[in-house]
């Protein structure tokens, strides 16, 4: 075999392994290897493709997020229209539906399949010659938008299907955001002052219809396939259930809660069962879809208008309830915004007790004419924060009070201002303790520095005890200072310190997001990190330059400049730098530093320096300290009494340095930086 043939073979084998493990993880939810092992396979493939670009193919697992942002979506004509479903809202509607269809196929036994009605967005995926070629929205049923590059980023969508699949076919399904993903997305949007997604459908549609696929790739979208649209050159299975089994065997993600029901009683029991258990699911459903199982019967029943007669959506009732609005509380956010929220008499809505609801701002409260003491209609849409639809005016007694924003901050009592054109009131005091505490909580949270074990409660206790004043102080915490807290034991303290240490290696986008610059969410943070390779480069950016970045407008740029000029923020950044928090993008680390791409292992006892200290220096110079000698190790540094690692390094032909040689090398490398 020539070298190229060997590489080709390895690339094919890696792709097969990656696709297999991707399917186990994202479709079957039952991984066989660790994330690190998976990442290693993907990295190997990426490197081979980098050195042999001619081997890259669009269905390679490295090519999920490949394309450049679009300026607009193209149109896709659906060869067979994507239909909608008629709705049913009660058992009587189902009885009437059954009566209609059984009258059309008299004497024939009908069995049904009940599926969850996933609350997301309908999409169609077309495969040609085993590869995914088009992904489209439903649109008006006859033509939709071409969102192929966004759907490719959903890991549970196979980019290729096994040999033996039909030459050309289309599957249909629902793209959705799981509850947790949706809640997180809304939290971020709220922090960025963006309008929240009112329901899971809007969130899925908003995510899938991004012109930049890198943004879609960061949204935790998933999919369930629920139909085979059409297929060329294949004998169609005779039932819907078999069709779903077949699609599963091709690698598609099928919802596991599909029930085969022999009669209407079983169908109704299935619906009522899910109506009471829907909260247990990790994604939102808005009903149960009932389908006639036999394809022959489906064809016989046909359509009426846009709806098939052979299927119906049995919808859940809206999750609404009424209760009293006891008071309106104010939360001071990390940017100083005064966020009003409703304090409600606890009420059970769809199995969940609601005590708080979002009230976006003063204007919103007045527009809906919500008064303290009112009976109000409260609505829950999936995992979205409950909201108040409006007051029940007929139940007013005359004692209800109109709400007014306070003139002073409820936390620090400084003046409250509302800038022209802004909906939010803000506390004018940049040193407001509420802002400082919220900023620290945000800094440590998931998506930001993700410091495990450092949640809202711990931040609050540390802050109230005066142990931390800003996020930079987190890294000065010691075992002793942590033990001052109530209910903090040795073990928890050690865990907190370990998570803090780990968080120092978070990526630049994480850090930019964590700093809490107004209007900078995870997405903008990533865009900034791509443009600027370090916090220093970002701090030196000018207004014109920032405005030149697509998707960054004057409000965001002004926010960045003002934030990075404020002494208290530059102080925090300096504290983070001193603590050794990573302030550069991986690319900058890889490209610009003397040890970039170089792997070191240290073994044996060192005379002049501590091992951790040396490892920190290696990292600071762009290198990677590791503990195992592998083929990838570039240097083994040996102290006295080296163990088996020395022999292994020698057998692999790895360069061995003694401590002094290494210190010399360090000196040279450090000199290069000056
Ligand atoms: S079947 C002709 N099955 O509900 C049958 N639809 O109101 C086409 N949906 O546009 C649809 N889960 O977006 C079907 N298990 C499921 C579904 C489902 C969610 C959505 C789909 C469709 C809408 C119909």
Image (spheres, grey):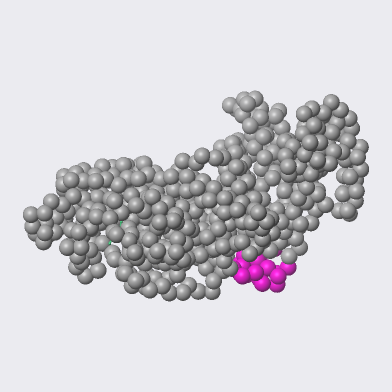
The N terminus - image quarter: bottom right
Along the line of sight, the residue nearer the viewer: 79 or 617:
79
Q: Is residue 595 left or right of residue 311?
A: right
Instruction: Report whether residue 552 is seen.
Output: yes
Seen at 75% across and 53% down, the residue is 589
**Where is residue 314, by image quadrant?**
bottom left
Magenta part mainly helix, strand or loop? helix
Q: Position of residue 384 (x, y in %)?
A: 42, 52
Query: Residue 374, can we see it?
Result: no
- Assess whether residue 561 is covered by the magenta stretch: yes
- Where is residue 381 drawn, in percent x and y? 37, 53
Q: What residue do we see at 41% from left, 45% from top?
A: 282
Q: How many numbered marks does the figure carry?
A: 0
Which one is in front, 269 or 490? 269
Measuring 58% from the left and 26% from the top, which residue is drawn there? 487
Asked whether 83 or 134 is in front, the reply is 134
**Seen in the image, is 521 located left or right of residue 362?**
right
Q: Position of residue 643 (x, y in %)?
A: 79, 27
Q: Residue furthest front?
A: 1
Say if 653 sits above or below 570 in the image.
above
Does the magenta portion include 577? no
Query: Where's the C terminus, which quadrant?
Result: bottom right
Residue 556 coordinates in the image, percent (x, y): 62, 65
Report the image quarter containing ligand 1.
bottom left
Splitting the image into 4 quarters, where does residue 425 fall?
bottom right
Q: Residue at x 70, y 70 (%)?
A: 545
Is 498 rendered above or below residue 250?
above
Give the extent of the magenta segment: 542-563
């Amino acid at each position: 075999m020539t070298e190229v043939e060997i590489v080709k073979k390895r690339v094919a084998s890696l792709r097969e392994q990656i696709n297999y493990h991707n399917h186990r993880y994202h479709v079957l939810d039952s991984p066989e290897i660790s994330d690190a092992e998976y990442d290693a396979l993907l990295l190997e493939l990426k490197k081979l493709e980098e050195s042999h670009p001619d081997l890259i193919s669009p269905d390679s697992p490295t090519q999920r997020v490949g394309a450049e942002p679009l300026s607009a979506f193209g149109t896709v004509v659906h060869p067979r229209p994507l239909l909608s479903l008629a709705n049913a809202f009660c058992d009587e509607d189902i009885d009437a539906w059954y009566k209609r269809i059984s009258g059309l196929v008299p004497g024939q036994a009908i069995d049904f399949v009940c599926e969850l009605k996933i609350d997301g967005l309908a999409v169609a995926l077309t495969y040609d010659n085993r590869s995914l070629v088009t992904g489209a929205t439903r649109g008006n049923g006859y033509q939709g938008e071409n969102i192929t590059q966004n759907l490719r980023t959903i890991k549970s969508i196979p980019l290729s299907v096994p040999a033996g699949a039909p030459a050309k076919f289309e599957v249909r399904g629902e793209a959705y955001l799981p509850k947790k993903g949706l809640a997180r997305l809304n939290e971020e949007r709220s922090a960025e002052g963006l309008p929240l997604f009112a329901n899971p459908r809007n969130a899925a549609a908003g995510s899938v219809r991004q012109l930049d696929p890198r943004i879609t790739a960061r949204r935790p979208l998933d999919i369930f396939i629920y139909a085979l649209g059409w297929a060329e050159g294949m004998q169609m299975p005779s039932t819907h259930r078999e069709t779903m089994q077949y699609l599963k065997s091709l690698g598609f993600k099928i919802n596991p809660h599909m029930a085969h029901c022999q009669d209407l009683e079983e169908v109704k029991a299935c619906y009522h069962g899910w109506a009471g258990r829907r909260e247990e699911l990790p994604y939102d459903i808005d009903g149960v879809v009932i389908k006639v199982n036999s394809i022959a019967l489906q064809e016989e029943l046909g359509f009426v208008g846009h709806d098939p007669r052979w299927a119906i959506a049995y919808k859940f009732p809206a999750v609404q309830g009424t209760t009293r609005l006891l008071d309106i509380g104010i939360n001071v956010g990390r940017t100083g915004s005064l966020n009003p929220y409703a304090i409600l008499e606890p009420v059970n809505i769809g199995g969940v007790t609601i005590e708080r609801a979002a009230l976006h701002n003063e204007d919103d409260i007045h527009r809906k004419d919500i008064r303290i003491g009112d009976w109000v209609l409260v609505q829950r849409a999936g995992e979205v924060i409950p909201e108040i639809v409006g007051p029940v005016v007929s139940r007013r007694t005359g004692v209800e009070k109109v709400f007014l924003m306070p003139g002073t901050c409820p936390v620090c009592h400084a003046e409250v201002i509302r800038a022209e054109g802004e909906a939010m009131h803000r506390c004018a005091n940049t040193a407001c303790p509420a802002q400082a505490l919220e900023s620290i909580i945000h800094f440590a949270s998931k998506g930001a520095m993700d410091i495990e074990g450092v949640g809202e409660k711990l931040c609050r206790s540390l802050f109230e005890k005066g142990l931390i004043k800003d996020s930079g102080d987190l890294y000065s915490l010691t075992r002793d200072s942590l033990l001052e807290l109530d209910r903090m034991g040795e073990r928890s303290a050690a865990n907190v310190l370990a998570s803090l240490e780990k968080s120092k290696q978070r990526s630049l986008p994480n850090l930019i997001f964590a700093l809490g610059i107004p209007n900078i969410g995870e997405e903008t943070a990533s865009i900034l990190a791509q443009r600027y390779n370090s916090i220093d480069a970002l701090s030196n950016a000018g207004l014109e330059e920032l405005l030149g970045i697509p998707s960054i407008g004057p409000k965001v740029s002004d926010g960045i400049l003002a934030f990075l000029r404020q002494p208290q923020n530059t102080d925090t950044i300096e504290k983070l730098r001193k603590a050794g928090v990573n302030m550069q993008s991986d690319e900058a680390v890889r490209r610009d530093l003397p040890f970039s791409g170089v792997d070191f292992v240290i073994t044996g006892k060192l005379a002049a320096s501590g091992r951790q200290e040396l490892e920190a220096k290696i990292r600071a110079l762009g290198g990677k300290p590791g503990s195992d000698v592998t083929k990838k190790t570039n240097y083994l540094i040996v102290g006295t009494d080296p163990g088996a690692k020395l022999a292994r390094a020698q057998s692999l032909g790895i360069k061995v340095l003694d401590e002094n040689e290494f210190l010399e090398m360090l000196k040279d490398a450090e000199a290069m930086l000056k």
